[in-house]
Amino acid sequence: MTFVLSDKNIFNYLVEHRLCTQLESDLYQVEPIRAKNFNLLLTLPESRKLLIKQERHNKEGKTLGEFLSEWRIQEFLQKFPELSYLRAWMPEALHFEAEYSIIVFSYLDEYRDLADFYDKENVFPTEIGEAIATILATIHRATFNRQEYQEFFSAKPTNNLSPAHVPNWVRSIERIGPEIFGIVPADGLKFFKLYQRYSSLGQAMRELADVFQPCCLTHNDLKLNNILLHNNWEQEWEQESPNIIRLIDWERSCWGDPAFDLGTLIASYLQIWLSSLVISKSLTIEESLRLAMTPLEQLQPSIAALTSAYFDNFPEILEHRPNFLMQVVQFAGLALIQQIQAMIQYEKSFGNKGICMLQVAKSLLCRPEQSLATVFGTASKLLVPWLSQGMRY
């Protein structure tokens, strides 16, 4: 029988698993948090807070099992204590029950998600991008080409059709059959018509899938709302604290390609620009891109700073992969296409903003070298040392 959490049974569940005590039974508050999973926030005495998440069940009473990957990160760090310093940048998971797909975290009350910060403050300090990239590069470098780490993740394979498994994902998007007409709304069919029309786009995606190289631990879902920023980040930055940033929601994590992670992160910044486009029948795509409410020029310094910081902390990647930066730009384009797919799946739409996003994605995938100026702008000069170093190899 399926066990489903609710605000009525949550406290008893936590007591049963020794995460609370009966002494706190009259002293707690519980509130739901809107998300794709069923999430509850429990506030206990002395400002202690727990975030309890349960995957939603389908009609057969089954879940996707995504929390297995989330908990696997905790098992990984426990098995390899030499990597315990990475915990400072990850969520604090306390409990996992695979049978009911329930996971419990310490709630990080002193943080806010980065998407909210950028949306509310409308500023894009380069220090934040640098901090994120430093963490990402450190994780990639610490696990790079380590066979014992790879064997750990290979022993428990993940969903092979997830966006992080690029070769399989690309093949799946090309296997479009008649059944799509009963699944995708009319607006969504526009995307597939355009995708099939752009033969160069499909070719670029297939070629990118062919050079996909899993070689380290990757997060695989670096959207801005999966990145937490400390509320007092400026003070923490001045004190050189390692706690400015936390990367959460490791549900798609696996042994993957670091270029996918960095490309996805860059695409998250590009989406701030693309989501602010001014759309009108009287404007061309080029005019809409230029008139965005959040101009690309406002984001480019952060994108360049985070990319430069990544190479500062993981320069060896260019020795192994001289074309790494070009592949990162292409993966940014791929991430935009995956975002379009998500819009079609969840929002049931593919309008003019989606078409603009597709045009940008096509440029990044098909012309990565020429797209450097688009992505990084005048700040691309920060990357000259890394471009020339890559060419030496």
Image (tube, helix red, strand yellow):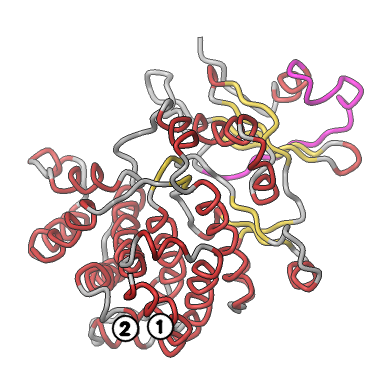
Q: Is residue 26 magenta?
A: yes
Provide the residue designation for mark 2. 288
Rendering quarter of residue 244: bottom right
What's the residue at 31%, 64% (across, down)?
A: 327
- Kindly identify which residue carries mark 1: 292
Q: Position of residue 10 (x, y in %)?
A: 70, 25
Q: Is residue 179 above or below residue 343?
A: above
Residue count near mark 2 (Cα–Cα under 10 Å), binned few <14, some 14–19, many ≥20: many
Q: Residue furthest front?
A: 392
Query: Considering only vertical position in the picture, is 333 above or below 290?
Result: above
Q: Give yes or no for residue 393 being in the magenta stretch.
A: no
Q: Return the x and y of residue 285 as percentages of the image width and height.
A: 25, 81
Residue type beneath disc 2: Ser
Residue 302 % position (x, y): 53, 77
Viewer-side residue, 21 vs 263: 263
Q: Do the numbered discs 1 and 2 sit on residues whose CB atoms are within 8 Å?
A: yes
Mark 1, secondary structure of its residue: loop
How far across and how far down the image is residue 101, in percent? 54, 25
Look at the image and tell me in which quarter the C terminus lies. Answer: bottom left
Q: Residue at image x 37%, y 59%?
A: 320
Q: Nearer the viewer, residue 24 or 82?
A: 82
**239 sits left or right of 355 in the view:** right
Q: Residues within 10 Å of mark 1 (few under 14, many from 20)?
A: some
Q: CA distance from mark 1 to mark 2?
A: 6 Å
Which residue type carries mark 1?
A: Ala
Number of numbered discs present?
2
Q: Is residue 254 above or below residue 276?
A: above
Instruction: Assign a secondary structure to mark 2.
Output: helix
Residue positioned 45% across, 28% down in the render: 65
Q: Residue at x 12, y 38 (%)?
A: 179
Query: Magenta region: which residues?
Result: 16-35
